[in-house]
Amino acid sequence: MKKLVEIDDSIITKLKVLSAFEGLSVKALMEKAIELFVKNKQKEQLDSLTKEQKEDLGLLLLMQQADRTDTVSEEAFLKALK
């Protein structure tokens, strides 16, 4: 996806210097910075969840990984509940 973003000239100069130090293109450096920013924000959101919300999220992730074609008989289900 190609997006045009207007960036201040002073920021561009700093990006060029940083990219030279990092041995990356300016584009790669910006992608890396954005990726780190997004991961940091996701971590902040996860850290701010309550214990119950974390458990709910964990259950949701487990449910998404479950094989939906794998079924069990009603008898086996009721037996497991006892």
Image (spheres, grey):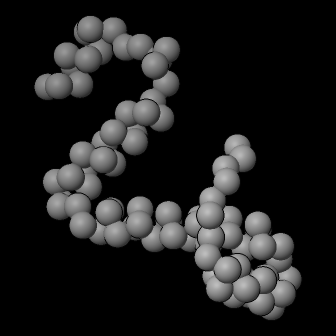
State the image coordinates of residue 18 (x, y, percent, origin top left). 74, 87
Left or right: residue 18 compared with residue 59: right
Measuring from the top left, give residue 17's x and y in whole percent: 77, 89
Residue 57's place in the image compared with 23, above or below, is: above
Q: Nearer the viewer, residue 21 or 81?
A: 21
> Of residues 80 and 56, which is closer to you in this image?
56
Point 85% across, 83% down: residue: 23
Q: Which quadrant of the figure contains the N terminus?
A: top right
x and y percent of residue 16 in the render? 78, 83
User: Residue 77, how many percent across, how many down?
Assistant: 26, 17
- Work out whether residue 22 can be spotted: no
Q: Residue at x 68, y 65 (%)?
A: 31
Identify the image quadrant of residue 61. top left
State whether residue 25 is above or below residue 78. below
Give the side of residue 37 with respect to residue 64, left or right: right
Image quadrant in which you'd find residue 75:
top left
Q: Which residue is drawn at the image coordinates 33% and 39% (left, top)?
A: 60
